[in-house]
Image (tube, rainbow, N blue to C red):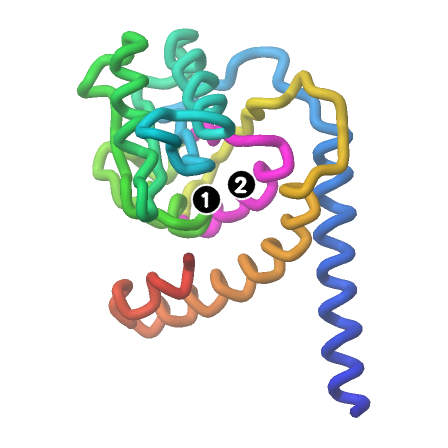
Amino acid sequence: MSFIRWILSLTILALWCAFIGTMLYVAMFEPPETTPQAQAVVVLGGNPPENGALVGPSLARLETGVALIEDGAAPYLVVTGGGPQPVAPLMADAAKAAGVAEDAVLVEAQAQSTLQNALLTADFAELDKSQPIIIVTERYHLPRAWASFRWAGFEQVHNVATDADEPFALSTPLLLESVKWPLNILRAGAASVAMAFDVPRESFMNYLE
């Protein structure tokens, strides 16, 4: 019983630390004074499309990413997001319709989690992991996304929030981050061990969802 209590206490502590850390990051977030310069703006897919159209977080993230490209922040726009209704192709179409050059848009339509977003984005031959990238998502998601892309090998990751000007408020997605953080760490750790032993990626990729 003492071992079970120890595991339970450790789990509660991890969830609490993840929640407090994420809440403080969101509350204290300040956008950069100048637009960061990078090799690519990476827009993480959010919610699935509705009736074949971008809505909600996915739309907001794409609009922010396109604005960064228009400001000259990077030569490439990466859109990443898969699932039963892949959102990345729709984001790519919307970006091109907004004026982003077709050869500047890189599409990754397989990822179903933040870890997969990062790992599959790192596969693009056009990207050099030693050069900076900009990731675009909401404030609550940025710390875990940043950690995921660093885990995937990107050495310099800049954060841009779609909701930087919104007041702090508790929300369901923010609360869920306290659960997702420990799971993210466990899955990334297990995947790192697998890769260290040259286990084929397809053997563990599903466990990163």
Q: Pick the residue in front: 69 or 176.
A: 176
Give the quarter of the figure containing the N terminus: bottom right
Q: Pick the residue in front: 68 or 178.
A: 178
| Three-letter residue code for mark 2 | Trp
Question: Is residue 137 found inside the magenta-colored segment of the image?
Answer: yes
Give the quarter of the figure containing the C terminus: bottom left
Disc 2 designates what residue?
A: 146
Residue 28 at what x, y percent from top left? 76, 29
Q: Is residue 92 above or below residue 172?
A: above
Q: Pick the residue in front: 78 or 91.
A: 91
Instruction: Please name the residue shown 76% across and 28% down the image.
Output: 168
Q: Which residues are magenta?
A: 132-152
Q: Is residue 129 left or right of residue 59?
A: left
Q: Check whether the beta carbons of the residues at disc 1 and disc 2 lie within 8 A of each other.
A: yes
Residue 45 figure quarter = top left
Q: Is residue 160 left or right of residue 133?
A: right
| Three-letter residue code for mark 1 | Phe
Instruction: Please name the residue shown 47% across and 51% down the image.
Output: 151
Disc 1 designates what residue?
A: 149
